[in-house]
Image (cartoon, rainbow, N blue to C red):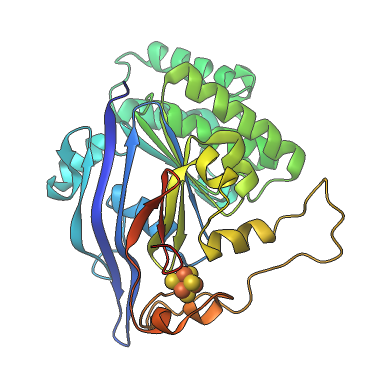
Amino acid sequence: MREQLLKIEDLWVHYKTDDATNYAVNGISLELQAGENIGLVGETGAGKTTTALSILRLLPPKIGVIKQGKILFDGQDILKLTESDMRTIRGNKISMIFQDPMTSLNPVLTVGDQIAEVLILHNESDSSEGVQKRVDDILRLVGIQAKRKNEYPHQLSGGMKQRIVIAIAIACNPMLLIADEPTTALDVTIQAQVLEMMDNLKNTLNTSLLLITHDLGIVAQMCDRVAIMYSGEIVEYGTVEDIYGAKERHPYTDGLFGSIPDLVKETKRLNPIGGQMTDPANLPAGCKFHPRCPKCMEICKTVQPKAIEIQGHQIKCHLYK
Ligand code: SF4
């Protein structure tokens, strides 16, 4: 049986500005076992990145506030650690791959130096020969020739830059890798290569993966479980088999599936979800999806649905009792 690596319990995160409070994450709970992959899926503004930044304690100071909840990582409550304890965890036990490789890399340092920086910070090797050998090994692991370590980010293609970002993230063999839309900025061919490489790395290093994406196809390819997020809540949660194969799903999940072209059936028009994501500063009463839900009932406008277990997975919706 796999050991529990990450447990988020009833997490609430707000962003406070002078004008408004944005309710970004509203009571989410999820678990991740060692070696397991979870996909966090939803539209922009669903609270996916805020969840990831909360795990790393990288919310914008004074504006991003964790109001309530626990984040247990490898048995420790992350929210109770000191900042210096967190620095030993970030980039070492938990790493994050950010969305855009263009802005994640330092343009005035060679890519080799940027990988070496992480190794030196976390004392992965004491001698400079040891660090350089490790840089060469990591570059080979992500499919880049070691001799290219002396190049600057602008000398590499988009796909190679993203491989360097991944190389930096895995340099210290993290227990948990958080990947925030790791392939969104890449074209489809490079996307497929990067995903295959991440999958191979996960198997080689036995790293757990929290994959943030809006692409259900990538989740099917990479993940064991999936959490569907809407307006800062997890509205559906279960294994990929349960949710993809289920007859009864949350209307929002159905909407996400309806937005994907079907390669088998002839479809004249896709069925996108109507309307806009709710304003996090002005959340509606009841079910937060009700202004956009094609199956909305009277009760949905006033009473917030509770999560119930159905066909092996959890759904928050009044349609299911
Ligand atoms: Fe739609 Fe009501 Fe279910 Fe919300 S609770 S998803 S509004 S049917």
In this rendered view, identify the residue nearer to me: 300 or 213: 300
Q: Position of residue 9 (x, y in %)?
A: 23, 51
Res. 289 in view: no
The answer to whether residue 129 is above or below residue 315 is above
Res. 39 in view: yes
In this rendered view, identify the residue nearer to me: 87 or 205: 205
User: In the displayed image of the protein, which residue is found farthest to the bottom?
Assistant: 19
Q: How many marks?
A: 0
Q: Position of residue 216 (x, y in %)?
A: 61, 48
The answer to whether residue 174 is above or below residue 57 is above
- At x 40%, y 17%, the residue is 131
Q: Position of residue 169 (x, y in %)?
A: 44, 34
In this rendered view, identify the residue nearer to me: 24 or 173: 24
Name the quarter where the N terminus is drawn. top left
Determine the image quadrant of residue 193: top right
Lateral position of residue 164 relative to residue 66, left or right: right
In this rendered view, identify the residue nearer to me: 64 or 206: 206
Determine the image quadrant of residue 189: top right
